[in-house]
Image: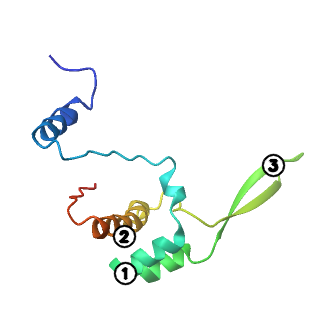
Amino acid sequence: MRSANKSQPTIIPVEAALDRHPEWVCVKADARNAFNAVHREAMFEAIERDFPELWAWTDLCYGVDANLGFRLGGVDGSVMRFVKSKEGTQQGDPLGPLYLAAPLQVVLERVQEGHPNVVIFAY
């Protein structure tokens, strides 16, 4: 019989692995609005370290704060205001997942250095 819970095929093998290894811990982290939360400085450092061939492109796309415009209305709808985009990745950027994952990899490596007996699987 198939479960209504679509994550069931994933949960069963994880539970079985944890039953066999009670010293293991499984953590699922889900950051709300993660693509907008990544600090660009950390993003630049990670790209320079791990993907130096992308650094110039990243700098071109994110090196200057972008103006994000929005309409406030007005009689003809022409009243515009702007805010600066200073953090996160740009919506629709095909490299956005990489720009999010690269700084997270640095964090995971630091955790691993502090806890060498811990095995970290991240995807």
The way the protein has been coloured in the rendering is rainbow
What's the amino acid at mark 1? Arg
Q: Amino acid at mark 3?
A: Leu
Which residue is at a point 46% across and 61% down the rendered structure image?
93
Instruction: List the residue tagged with mark 3.
Output: 72
Q: At x 40% / y 75%, what residue is drawn?
A: 46
Q: Quadrant of the C terminus?
A: bottom left
Q: Mark 1 and mark 2 in contact (Cβ < 8 Å)?
A: yes
Mark seen at residue 106: 2
Distance (Cα) linking label 2 and label 3: 40 Å
Position in image of residue 4 (x %, y %): 27, 20
Q: Where is 113 relative to 26, above or below?
A: below
Query: Which residue is depicted at the point 18% across and 35% down?
Result: 15
The alpha-carbon separation of the residues under discs 2 and 1 comes to 10 Å
Residue 1 in the image, given as x and y percentages of width and height: 14, 16
Local crowd at mark 3 within 10 Å, few (<14), some, or many (≥20)? Answer: few
Residue in front for this viewpoint, 75 or 11: 11
Q: Earlier in the sequence, mark 2 or mark 1?
A: 1
**SS at mark 1 in the image:** helix
Horizontal and vertical percent for residue 7? 26, 32
Label placed on residue 24: none
**Residue named by callout 1:** 49
Name the foreground residue: 40 vs 56. 40
| Left or right of 36, for residue 56 | left
Kind of residue at badge 2? Val
Compared to residue 103, the image places residue 91 above or below, namely: above
The secondary element bearing badge 3 is classed as: strand
Q: Earlier in the sequence, mark 3 or mark 1?
A: 1
